[in-house]
Image (cartoon, rainbow, N blue to C red):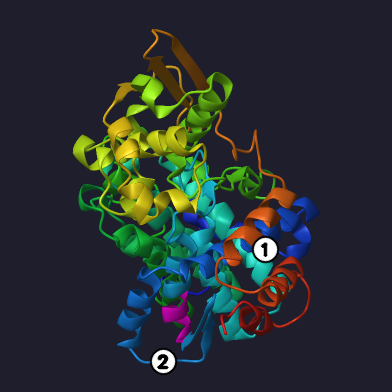
Amino acid sequence: MSLDSPTRATTGQAGRVADFAAGLDAADIPDEVLERARYLVLDAVGLAFASTAYRFPGVARDALATFGGGEHPVLGMPDRLSPRDAAVLNGVLVHGMDFDDTHIPAVTHVSAAALPAAISAATVVGASTRDLLAAYVLGVEVSARVGLGGAGGFHDVGFHPTAVAGAFGATVAAGKLSGLDAAGLAAAQGVVGSMSAGLLEFLEDGSWTKRLHPGWAAMSGLTAAAFAKAGWTGPAAVYEGRFGLYATHLAGRATHPEAVSEGLGTQWELMRTAVKPYPICHFNHAFADAALLLRAEHGIAPADVRAIRCAIHPVPGKVVCQPAENKWAPRDEYDAKFSLPFVVSAALSRGQFTLAELEDDALGDPEILALARRVEVTDDDEGLFPDAYSGRVEIELADGRVVAHREQVNRGHDRRPLTNAEIAEKFEGTIGRVADAGTAARVRDAVLSLGDERPAAEFAEACRGL
């Protein structure tokens, strides 16, 4: 059979994913998965609105305006762009505060690319919100599995799995909505493999590139799906091949390419997706909880602290503990999100960690910065990474006491999930930073009614900023 044949057999991991995706109908997805999906979307859209209070969305919009406008609405903003550019900006908005959901074992922000790709693709083809929601779920399932295949290794070699895995999930979501058959969906995954990348070098200087990663993954997914629909071919063994994703990105490391298709339709990875209780890197969450618990239980004041010792697995440790000088004194709010010393010290100093602890007065607070210098980081050989983001905090007090607490499974994990009610409360807090009660109600109603026959374009308009 010719490689150009649209009916050629699908093979390998990409083929298995394609076969599943081509045959998936919204009716095949359990009701509890669809309901949780609505709340994950609610969280993402609330974050997109909240991001508009910062400078970075305006910079992204100005850059994208270089390529001309369009009619596609943008989450939380009044702008209209082309569908691909809207997906880029929507990804920036959802992920820009690093407060969005994470599939813990995959170490991947799964909604930030899958949702923008699904919204744009569904609007372009005139799909219903039922189709949009099913494609979003599919995008999350694929993104999570591609991340799982990396066995927690992407961060260790400097790749951001949200960018890498998210491109594949976005591709399958967009391809499903554009009507690709199994052969086309397999080809689209092969095409996007050459676009799948995202470097962690931003950790060295606090630059903004990570904010762009999921939007770029969403755009790559839309592009790959369009090329496949037009008849472009891609390598069948894009995941497991000699020069496939895992061999090139994680050369010499233990990987599990079979995870890409394992359990599709029976194990719903969306249900294992964690919603963040804190606006910081997920690797820091256990430490924030531990510090706050110790402060409350022992009445600790900053002046009481002689030393702080934090135990973390070395792979996430590279992200939130190195280089040490940057972590002791973050240069801006985004830098602070990735600083374990700052997060622990701010929590101990202020008794909370909210968006307020990322504002300028906290970043320059002498008390917090002095505490951060007392943080010593050690390797944790008892943690569960990458299955959970464990953390242990030990505080040596001036009176000689030593108190400690371990959070073995971080809050938000599927073993300790935030409830739908807690997600709704988080949404009210995030969207409430920039929008009135009427806007919040309009958006909430549009999101929580996803899954009917209304046009997806109506949903996108309801979530647009005015």
For the record, the magenta segment spans 81-87
Q: Secondary structure at mark 1?
A: helix
Q: Secondary structure at mark 2?
A: loop
Q: Position of residue 281 (x, y in %)?
A: 42, 45
Q: Position of residue 228 (x, y in %)?
A: 45, 75
- At horizontal 48% and vertical 56% (from top left) the residue drawn is 14
Q: Position of residue 205 (x, y in %)?
A: 21, 52
Label 1, on which residue? 23
Tell me the kind of residue under disc 1.
Gly
Instruction: Examine the rendered structure and indicate whether residue 455 appears above or below residue 421.
Output: below
Residue 362 horizontal side relative to residue 431, left or right: left
Q: Where, quadrant-wise, is the C terminus in this rendering?
A: bottom right
Instruction: Examine the rendered structure and indicate whether residue 347 appears above or below residue 382.
Output: below
Label 2, on which residue? 69
Mark 1, residues whose alpha carbon is within 10 Å: few (<14), some, or many (≥20)?
few
User: Cα distance, mark 1 to mark 2?
Assistant: 35 Å
Nearer to me, 139 or 266? 139
Q: Is residue 140 something one can see in this rendering? A: yes
Tell me the kind of residue under disc 2.
Gly
- At horizontal 33% and vertical 48% (from top left) the residue drawn is 363
Whether the magenta-drawn stretch holds residue 83 is answered as yes
